[in-house]
Image: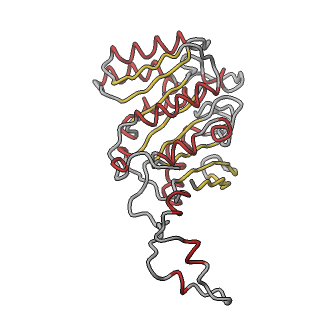
Amino acid sequence: MAKFNCNFISYTLTRAVDITVVIPSVTIPEAMAAGPGVLDAVSETDVNGDMEGMSAGISFPSHRKENKYPVLYLLHGMGNNHATWTGYTNIEMFAEERNIAVVMISAENKSYVNHKSGDRFYDFLETELPEFIGGMFPVSDRPEDTYIAGLSMGGFGTLVHGLKYPEKYAAIGAFSSAIFLEPSRLAGGLKEAVNPDYDPKTLALRLEKEGKKGIHIFIACGENDFLYDANKEFQQMLKEQGQEVTWVSTPGFGHEWRFWNMIVEQFLDWLPRSDAYKSVGKRQI
């Protein structure tokens, strides 16, 4: 797995932002399988470092990709940042095994929505971030290859973006989501009017009114989580509206990283995929 910690100037936020991007790359098993033996070939080089001994009979894996990777935009929770998912879970290994790129941003405690203060994280996530990622990394821009998921505040953000623009994502994943909390409360008590575009329930009712059904939604929550009842109620509402909901209710877990580490792997295995890497199967890491 190639891991990139990026800092760049955002024209939407008018400041530098931090993101982490993981891209599948050559693994040790793949490198060691490169022909009759890389180490034997290296031993044949002369004292000047010429690589003539490596020219025969060796087929190296390539870093140049013929096909672009599907991409998951993975959102953190309150108090976290772009590095938290990789710090507390095995998301890098999970993603490399399944040939999927993962993008993680730092959205502070701003709920992935726009604020009157000038923090336009909603616009950043919807427009600028995919533009930056597509311009810098070998990832697909097809909606069929694009996914969004998150935990807690990030689950809230996932539902806000995924239910507002379901045509942009092949599937969405909401883990232990802060579903019915107002964005102003999530943002640290800022006194702002709640935009209906930032309310998952309002967005779900709007989809029902517009007759949009069949959206692939994965919702999971530990049964000991203080947000359990809200998540259970919301997934049932979505099912009744005709959405394709997978509900994972797990006993013995609360609002915790052990649960999210387990559930993000289940989510990756659940994803509906049509990309070129779908038939490859799980890679050995």
Residue 283, given in percent of the width and then of the height, sits at: 46, 49
Residue 280, given in percent of the width and then of the height, sits at: 37, 50
Q: Work out whether residue 153 or residue 261 is closer to the camera in this orientation and state it.
A: 261
Q: Residue 132, relative to residue 78: is it above or below?
A: below
Residue at point 55%, 77% (across, down)? 41
Residue 51, given in percent of the width and then of the height, sits at: 57, 84
Residue at point 67%, 90% (across, down)? 48
Residue at point 37%, 44% (across, down)? 143
Left or right: 111, with 171 as reference point: right
Number of numbered discs on residues:
0
Q: Work out whether residue 172 or residue 267 is closer to the camera in this orientation and state it.
A: 267
Residue 279, given in percent of the width and then of the height, sits at: 33, 48
Q: Residue 39, relative to residue 56: is it above or below?
A: above
Left or right: 158, with 244 as reference point: right
Left or right: 100, with 78 as reference point: left
Left or right: 27, with 14 as reference point: left
Q: Work out whether residue 207 or residue 273 is closer to the camera in this orientation and state it.
A: 273
Residue 166: which quarter of the image? top left
Q: Residue 96, relative to residue 212: is it above or below?
A: below
